[in-house]
Amino acid sequence: MARIAGVNIPTNKRVPIALTYIHGIGPSSAKTICEAVNIDQTRRVNELSDADVVAIREHIDSNFTVEGDLRREVQINVKRLMDLGCYRGLRHRRNLPVRGQRTHTNARTRKGPAKAIAGKKK
């Protein structure tokens, strides 16, 4: 079991797919990591040597912000917006959509389950 950036990546998957299990690394980043470390994208994680895993780990540590550091950075950015009192910060504070989506209908994911209104039936 390979452990990179504090995450146990699955051993039976191809390397680019397995790297996407790390928060902050998507498909395109995983491909660039494989190219930078000279690992064939068709190889599976259980076929990697310890040296390959170490090379991947070092490349990620030096070039990417991942996992806990990334989550902390995003959380600090949201908190900064909330402290400023700007429109985006107010939307975060009220737990409403931040990027201009409509809320008259939809937005149930962000707002939570619908609340019944008394006296609405006719």
Image (cartoon, grey):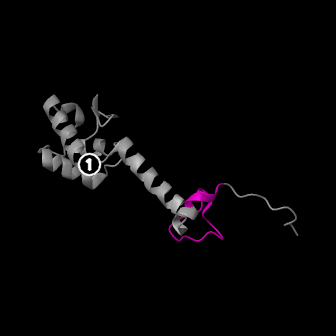
Farthest residue, direction left: 38
Farthest residue, direction front: 84
Tell me the quarter of the image containing the C terminus: bottom right
Q: What residue is at 38 percent from the left and 41 percent from the top?
A: 68
The quarter holding residue 93 reads bottom right
Q: What residue is at 31 percent from the left and 52 percent from the top?
A: 26
Where residue 60 appears, x then y in whole percent? 23, 44
Q: Is residue 32 magenta?
A: no
Tell me the quarter of the image containing the N terminus: top left
Magenta residues, start to end: 92-112
Mark 1, residues whose alpha carbon is within 10 Å: few (<14), some, or many (≥20)? some
**Is 61 left, or right, of 84 in this rendering?**
left
Examine the rendering and report whether any part of residue 43 can be seen: no
**Identity of the amino acid at label 1?**
Phe
Where residue 72 appears, x then y in whole percent? 41, 46
Q: Which SS class for mark 1?
A: loop
Q: Which residue is mark 1?
A: 64
The quarter holding residue 121 reads bottom right
Report the predominant secondary structure element of the magenta stretch.
Answer: loop
